[in-house]
């Protein structure tokens, strides 16, 4: 059995910014309402003219991760790509990334969709494939263009989301220092109607109501409460299961959906501010990209170093949840 280590991370953010004040031009809202309810100040929006799609943004993030890992594209031997909406129905976006990176070794390519939790699900899968010796370097991506399916007439939801891509290379470790300790991957399907997007897929493939697009249905308050409760519960259970104290956690990266959710979870563990990674104010909720983007930024800011204990937790449609404890 082998250990895995994160050998490189990268991220990509579209240049175009919509501030809360920009959104007041589209519908009745205010910077005050959005900031107070969510902590979000602005979000990035992908542009077709700039060739910004899930796969192309992911390729930028992956190139940065490869550079940081000091690896060549053909060193990658598997690609896992998490997105709530891939570029096409098929082929999958992981395959498009293989092409964009110029990988010629015919490595396996798989898309994963578990909404906001997909990237941690993919990391846990990647770790198993490294641990059992199947692969040495797996590219694990979270890339999202939520703006492509956001209903820009629905102020109650569109203000919450943004676009971004994050990528990590998980590699076979040659020592015992870096490793995955334990995880929870769960789903409560009884609450699947609380956050659901039905249109555009097999049951409703030709959805065209542009006047009144009912794209994302969400019971905001139910999702809020379930997110806080589930992430706090999973983190506590994971610390207990691994015999880890909260003081031993060097960095906590929670899903970046809402500052109030992050603060409520962090409060339960009395994590000091400097141990909690927060960038939701800059990028809003970028679904499965939030954690890899925050991780990449944490490395750039020097907030995460080799041997640190890292706790990641996320929550999303399903209602799925995922929490992971690892030593970086
Ligand atoms: N600007 C101004 N007013 C607004 C806006 C807006 N953008 N959106 C809604 N309102 C109004 C509503 O119409 C309502 O008005 P009314 O009282 O006259 O009917 C009022 O504000 C209050 O609306 P609520 O829905 O009760 O507001 P709430 O305090 O619950 O906040 C929010 C809503 C921010 C969506 C919150 O419930 C939340 O963050 N939930 C979590 C949802 C989430 O994060 N989903 C992302 C995906 S899941 C995940 O990643 C965890």
Image: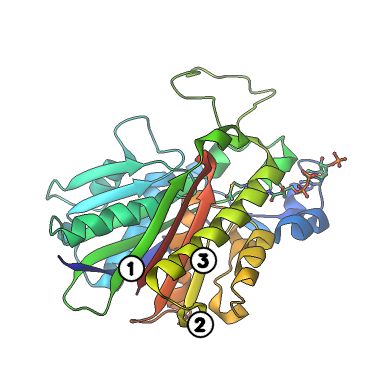
Q: Where 8 sits versus 308, above or below?
A: above
Name which of mark 2 and mark 1 comes first in the sequence.
Answer: 1
Name the residue carrying label 1: 181
Residue found at x 72% / y 34%: 153
Measure the C-alpha gap from mark 2 to mark 3. Answer: 13 Å
Sort mark 1 into few (<14), some (14-19) or many (20+) by Cα contacts within 10 Å: some
Quadrant of the image occupied by residue 281: bottom right
Name the residue carrying label 2: 247
Q: Are marks 1 and 3 in contact (CB under 8 Å)?
A: no
Measure the C-alpha gap from mark 1 to mark 3. Answer: 14 Å
Left or right: 53 with respect to 286? left
Quadrant of the image occupied by residue 223: top right
Name which of mark 2 and mark 3 comes first in the sequence.
Answer: 3
Q: Quadrant of the N terminus?
A: bottom left
Residue found at x 60% / y 52%: 227
Give 58 or 138, whichever is nearer the viewer.
138
Residue 95 place in picture, x, y as percent: 26, 42
Q: Where 2 sits versus 80, above or below?
A: below
Label 2 residue SS: helix
Q: Are marks 2 and 1 in contact (CB under 8 Å)?
A: no
């Amino acid at each position: 059995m082998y250990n895995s280590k994160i050998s490189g991370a990268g991220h990509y953010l579209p240049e175009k910014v919509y501030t809360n004040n920009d959104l007041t031009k589209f519908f009745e809202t205010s910077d005050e309402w959005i900031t107070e309810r969510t902590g979000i100040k602005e979000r990035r929006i992908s542009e077709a003219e700039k060739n910004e799609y899930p796969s192309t943004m992911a390729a930028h993030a992956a190139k940065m991760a490869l550079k940081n890992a000091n690896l060549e594209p053909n060193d990658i031997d598997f690609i896992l790509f998490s997105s709530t909406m891939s570029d096409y129905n098929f082929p999958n976006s992981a395959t498009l990334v293989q092409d964009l990176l110029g990988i010629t070794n015919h490595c396996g390519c798989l898309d994963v969709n578990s909404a906001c939790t997909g990237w941690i699900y993919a990391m846990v899968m990647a770790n198993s494939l490294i641990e059992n010796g199947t692969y040495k370097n797996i590219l694990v991506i979270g890339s999202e263009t939520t703006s492509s399916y956001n209903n820009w007439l629905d102020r109650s939801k569109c203000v919450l989301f943004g676009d971004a891509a994050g990528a990590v290379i998980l590699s076979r470790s040659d020592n015992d220092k870096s490793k995955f300790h334990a995880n929870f991957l769960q789903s409560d399907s009884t609450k699947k109607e609380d956050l659901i997007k039905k249109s555009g897929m097999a049951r409703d493939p030709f959805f065209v109501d542009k006047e009144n697009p009912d794209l994302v249905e969400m019971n905001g308050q139910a999702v809020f409460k379930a997110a806080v409760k589930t992430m706090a519960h999973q983190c506590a259970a994971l610390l207990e299961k691994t015999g880890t104290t909260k003081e031993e956690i060097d960095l906590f990266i929670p899903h970046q959906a809402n500052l109030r959710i992050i603060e409520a979870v962090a409060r339960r563990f009395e994590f000091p501010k400097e141990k909690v990674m927060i960038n939701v104010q800059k990028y809003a909720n970028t679904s499965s990209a939030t954690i890899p983007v925050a991780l990449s930024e944490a490395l750039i800011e020097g907030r995460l170093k080799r041997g640190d204990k890292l706790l990641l937790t996320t929550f999303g449609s399903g209602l799925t949840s995922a929490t992971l404890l690892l030593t970086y």
